[in-house]
Amino acid sequence: MDLCIIGSGYVGLVSGACFAEVGHHVICVDNDQRKVDMLQRGEIPIYEPGLEELVHKNVAAKRLRFTNSIEDGVDHSQIIFIAVPTPPQTDGSVDLTFIERVAREISGVLKPGQYRVVVDKSTVPVKTGEKVEATIKRYNKDAEFDVVSNPEFLREGCAVPDLMNPDRVVIGSASQKATDLMKRVYEPFQAPILVTDVNSAELIKHAANSFLSLKISYINAVSAICEASGADVEMVADGIGTDKRIGRNFLNAGLGYGGSCFPKDVKAFIAISRQLGTPFTLLEEVERINATMLTRFIDKVRSALWVLKDKKIAVWGMTFKPDTDDVRNSVAIELINQLVAEGAHVTAYDPKGAEKAVEWGLVDPTKVKLAKTPIEAVADAEALLLATEWKEFANVDFAAVKAKMHTPLVFDGRNLFDPQTMADLGFTYHAVGRPGPKAGA
Ligand code: NAD
């Protein structure tokens, strides 16, 4: 099938590459000329495992191309996916100006007799589909189209496998013709397809991300009780997570959730519920618990070092999760900036995210030293803080780390290391919600 994707970011580019991989012809559109130029030169603007190979292979096979022209995309494709940003506004509600603009741009290039399915893949508040439809009609009375909601559930860091093998595909549609076309798009993926009305599909996405955030805050609240009582949150998470009704995923205590989706989607769902007159106050508590995790963590560091000013602190991890270069709304970046604000001398290392953190102005390179290796980061450090659980950190030579550090003090914000092993290596080790070594032994 001929598909167009407007917005070639984490969702649009990976979706485009995966649609092409299963045999569709895909045009990825972006209005960021720099991004389009890079993609046309064969350079991939984001890091996502497996993406580069997939893009090169499908460009070579002439199933994937890039343009800055919406008209080009809409002209040559029966199905138009929208994958542009839906950032939060200061009151937490969603800024829909990107979506509205794309709706107008599509309406401007739709030709009479040219039936198109306009698919919203961006995460949007319930009832956005109705507004997209009304907008296209308002600017183009002759347009023949249907609007479908097809929320995306990929996780950055494993976006390619997530898109190739989705747990389910949600198609929110009021038109049989559009539903049939959408089913053909997804047929090669052999995934369960759930067809709903447009409003339900939109709501599924916010409800799903809010529920996952709630699971994280739940285990984080339990971790505080573990710390106060001497229990081990990892054992508790295993104990409750093996219950099939609960599941172990997303029961990882730590610094809390961050990234470009969970914080904004929880905020959006709170705002939507208020606008609809049914405030979802449970989610306000989810946010509150999440915010306390970083504060509790920094308090622990402060209680060990007393004063942070002029202390040399190494931070491992800058991205919001491993296997991505995405540093948007990363708790690790917040941690670094809070330490810097207290006068600490921070040296940070991240396998993929450091460059973007500087490029996007999220850390000040005159105030934060960026190391090229994890070992370089810990040179002379009085404490090592682990903020993102990259696998690379689990495999570091800790004897070399200890030899380089000023003081062998480790704060593990993601419970990546084993307390007993760290103690045996001679580190004073602090995790989240876990007692010191030997507990439970
Ligand atoms: P992104 O910022 O990585 O990409 C968006 C792209 O859209 C950018 O390249 C931007 O230049 C482009 N764009 C903006 N306006 C445009 C226009 N008028 N015409 C053409 N291109 C335009 O964003 P993302 O992370 O891919 O997220 C996109 C949407 O998908 C958001 O609603 C997000 O909530 C949702 N989502 C994201 C993820 C994720 O893990 N990143 C997962 C599921 C859903």
Image (spheres, rainbow, N blue to C red):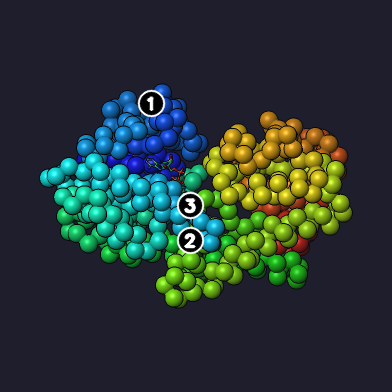
Which residue is labeled 3 in the image? Answer: 87
Q: Residue at x 69, y 42 (%)?
A: 316
- Percent from the top left, x then y, of residue 294? 69, 57
Image quarter in which the N terminus is found: top left
> Who is closer to the viewer here, 385 or 172?
172
Q: Residue at x 51, y 56 (%)?
A: 89
Would residue 204 be found to the left or right of residue 288 on screen?
Answer: left
CA gap, disc 2 to disc 1?
35 Å
Q: Of helix, strand and loop, which one carries label 3? A: loop
How many neighbours does mark 3 have within 10 angstroms: few (below 14), some (14-19), or many (20 or more)? many
Observer able to see residue 141: yes
- Percent from the top left, x then y, of residue 339? 76, 48
Would residue 204 be found to the left or right of residue 400 on screen?
Answer: left
Q: Are marks 2 and 1 in contact (CB under 8 Å)?
A: no
Is the residue at mark 3 in contact range of ligand 1, meaning its CB lies under 8 Å from it? no
How many neighbours does mark 2 have within 10 angstroms: few (below 14), some (14-19), or many (20 or more)? many
Which residue is labeled 2 in the image? Answer: 93
> What kind of residue is marked 1?
Gln
Q: Residue furthest bottom?
A: 278
CA gap, disc 1 to disc 3?
27 Å
Would residue 406 be found to the left or right of residue 60 on screen?
Answer: right
How many neighbours does mark 1 have within 10 angstroms: few (below 14), some (14-19), or many (20 or more)? some
Q: Earlier in the sequence, mark 2 or mark 1?
A: 1
Q: Residue furthest left?
A: 113
